[in-house]
Each structure stands twice: as structure tokens, then as C-alpha cells.
């Protein structure tokens, strides 16, 4: 009985630490506020907040549930698209904060071709992902 309580406490504390770190990471990068600013949708602030919270709770449910969760292929495609957009924006925000690409372009001597470098990286990622999913996952 005491072992179960200790495991529950450690699991809960670990979840709080990881969740807090993730929220701090998103806050430092400013992804959501930047998206709201760019899309000029400040009036949907509550909707964004509810969406982030419900998304996190649904992800937790899917992680801990042993029930199978089946949806149609079209829902999976839409869901995967949103995941890809989020991961891409997360990576872009991180590189923007760290100024990785301008520094890389300057070191390699491609500062005048920075747009071409970024487009090559973007299309390389897209084609590589499509190649993996079409050829290996089927």
C-alpha cells in the first residue's frame, strides 16, 4: 500500500516537472503569442487557451488509456498535418531564438543565399518525410 502511494507521488511529481518544463519552453519561445499576433486573432485568446489545455488533456488520456482509439483515415491525415505544423513551428521558433541559420549562413559564406538555404532545408524535410512514409510505412 505504501509503495503504491510512493509510486503515485513520484509519478505525479514527475508529470508536473515535465509539464512545467514544456509550458516554460513554449512560453520562452513565444510560439502561441507569436501565432496570435501574426494571424491577428487576439479576440480568440480564450479559444486558444482552451484548445491548448484540451489538447494536453486528450494527449494524456491517449497516453494512459489502454482502449483502442480508431478514427477514419481523413481524421488521421488532418491530425498528422496539425502535428507536423506544430513541430515545424516549434523547430522554427527555436532556431529563430538561437539565430542558428543566420550564423550558419555567415560561417559557410552563404549570407546572400539565406532564403535559398532555408527553402532547401524545408523542401528536404518535406521530401524526406514523404519518402519515409510512402516507401517504408505504407
Image (tube, grey):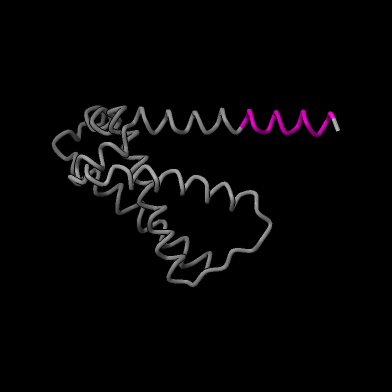
Q: Could you say where residue 64 lies in the image, as x and y percent from the top left?
A: 65, 49
Dominant secondary structure (helix, strand or loop) of the stretch shown in magenta: helix
Q: Is residue 89 above or below residue 82?
A: above
In which quadrant of the rendered image does the N terminus lie?
top right
Which residue is at 47% across, 71% downward? 73
Q: Nearer the viewer, residue 91 or 138?
A: 91
Left or right of 105: which side holds 23? right
Q: Is residue 115 magenta?
A: no
Q: Quadrant of residue 11?
A: top right
Q: Is residue 103 above or below residue 132?
A: above
The magenta-colored residue range is 2-14
Left or right of 39: which side holds 77? right
Which residue is at 57% across, 46% downward? 60
Q: Nearer the viewer, residue 116 or 78?
A: 78
Q: Is residue 47 above or below residue 78?
A: above
Give the farthest residue toward the right: 1
Q: Is residue 36 above or below residue 13?
A: below
Which residue is at 37% across, 42% downward? 49
Left or right of 54: which side holds 49? left
Numbered marks: total? 0
Q: Could you say where residue 102 lies in the image, as x and y percent from the top left?
A: 23, 31
Amino acid at each position: 500500500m505504501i509503495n503504491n502511494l510512493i509510486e503515485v507521488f513520484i509519478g505525479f511529481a514527475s508529470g508536473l516537472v515535465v509539464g512545467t518544463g514544456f509550458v516554460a519552453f513554449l512560453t520562452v519561445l513565444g510560439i502561441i503569442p507569436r501565432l496570435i499576433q501574426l494571424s491577428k486573432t487576439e479576440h480568440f485568446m480564450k479559444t486558444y487557451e482552451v484548445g491548448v489545455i484540451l489538447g494536453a488533456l486528450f494527449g494524456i488520456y491517449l497516453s494512459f488509456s489502454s482502449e483502442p482509439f480508431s478514427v477514419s483515415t481523413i481524421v488521421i491525415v488532418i491530425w498528422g498535418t496539425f502535428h507536423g505544423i506544430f513541430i515545424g513551428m516549434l523547430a522554427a521558433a527555436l532556431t529563430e531564438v538561437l539565430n542558428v541559420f543566420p550564423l550558419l549562413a555567415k560561417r559557410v559564406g552563404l549570407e546572400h543565399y539565406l532564403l535559398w538555404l532555408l527553402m532547401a532545408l524545408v523542401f528536404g524535410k518535406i521530401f524526406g518525410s514523404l519518402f519515409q512514409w510512402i516507401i517504408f510505412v505504407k
